[in-house]
Image (cartoon, rainbow, N blue to C red):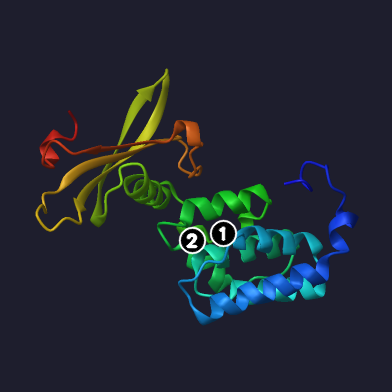
């Protein structure tokens, strides 16, 4: 944070690289031993490693990127890409194909101007709607999802502009209730070549109160 704010000069940090490498190796060993471990300041240490951009620091980042923990892998891959280091297409696809990570990973690539690496097969409004819906329901609504099934798309006027919405049938993962529910995700641009939605424009609605009904979708 101090580096990004220009309150600390890179040279003031770079002379401490051996200490950082020692700490990074210790945390890597902990994560390697226990895939469920998450040492303190792990993502910050990985990000700082990326600021050194040396053979040794990038070598450590590659080690972190090979770990199974998706948070650690994500931090390491983004740091390496910022340093213009090659990343296997299979690692990029792993995030693009994951509903939980898809949109967030694309946003990270966009910040570092690397969206060309994102697999085109996962860059679509429908694929992004699936990811936005997954994250909003588990995060904002705090529900677990048993299944999501795309039903249809609809358009509607929002603040004087036509927007596109994607409608899903959702079954929540509760033993006592398998009733399908109605969910909608938008508002997407009418141009289908634009898949992402700005945070302030994203709107996800889950109808808790009524059972899903195909005939009621238009209403």
Residue 69, percent from left and from top = 50, 70
Residue that badge 2 annotates: 96
Q: Are marks 2 and 1 in contact (CB under 8 Å)?
A: yes
In 3D space, how far apart are the residues under numbered discs 2 and 1 (Cα atoms)? 7 Å
* Secondary-structure class at tag 1: loop
Q: Quadrant of residue 188?
A: top left
Q: Is residue 135 left or right of residue 169?
A: right
Q: Residue at x 33, y 27 (%)?
A: 156
Which one is nearer the viewer's eye here, 193 or 27? 27
Q: Residue at x 48, y 31 (%)?
A: 200
Residue 118, percent from left and from top = 56, 59
Quadrant assignment for the C terminus: top left
Residue that badge 1 annotates: 118
Q: Residue at x 40, y 26 (%)?
A: 162
Q: Residue at x 82, y 67 (%)?
A: 17
Residue 163, percent from left and from top = 40, 30
């Amino acid at each position: 944070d101090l580096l990004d704010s220009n309150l600390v000069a890179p040279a003031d940090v770079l002379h401490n690289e051996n200490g950082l490498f020692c700490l990074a190796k210790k945390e890597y060993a902990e994560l390697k031993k226990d895939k469920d471990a998450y040492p303190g300041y792990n993502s910050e240490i990985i990000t700082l490693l990326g600021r050194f951009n040396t053979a040794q620091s990038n070598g450590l980042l590659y080690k972190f990127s090979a770990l199974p923990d998706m948070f650690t892998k994500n931090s390491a891959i983004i740091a390496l890409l910022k340093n213009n280091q090659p990343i296997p297409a299979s690692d990029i696809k792993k995030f693009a194909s994951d509903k939980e990570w898809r949109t967030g990973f694309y946003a990270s690539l966009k910040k570092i101007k690397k969206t060309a690496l994102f697999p085109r097969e996962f860059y679509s409004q429908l694929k992004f709607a699936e990811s936005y819906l997954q994250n909003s329901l588990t995060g904002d609504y705090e529900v677990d999802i048993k299944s999501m099934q795309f039903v249809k798309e609809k358009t509607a006027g929002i603040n004087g502009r036509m927007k596109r919405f994607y409608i899903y049938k959702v079954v929540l993962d509760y033993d006592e209730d398998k009733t399908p529910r109605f969910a909608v995700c938008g508002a997407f641009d009418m141009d289908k070549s634009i898949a992402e939605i700005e945070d302030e424009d994203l709107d996800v609605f889950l109808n808790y109160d009524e059972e899903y009904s195909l005939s009621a979708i238009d209403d």
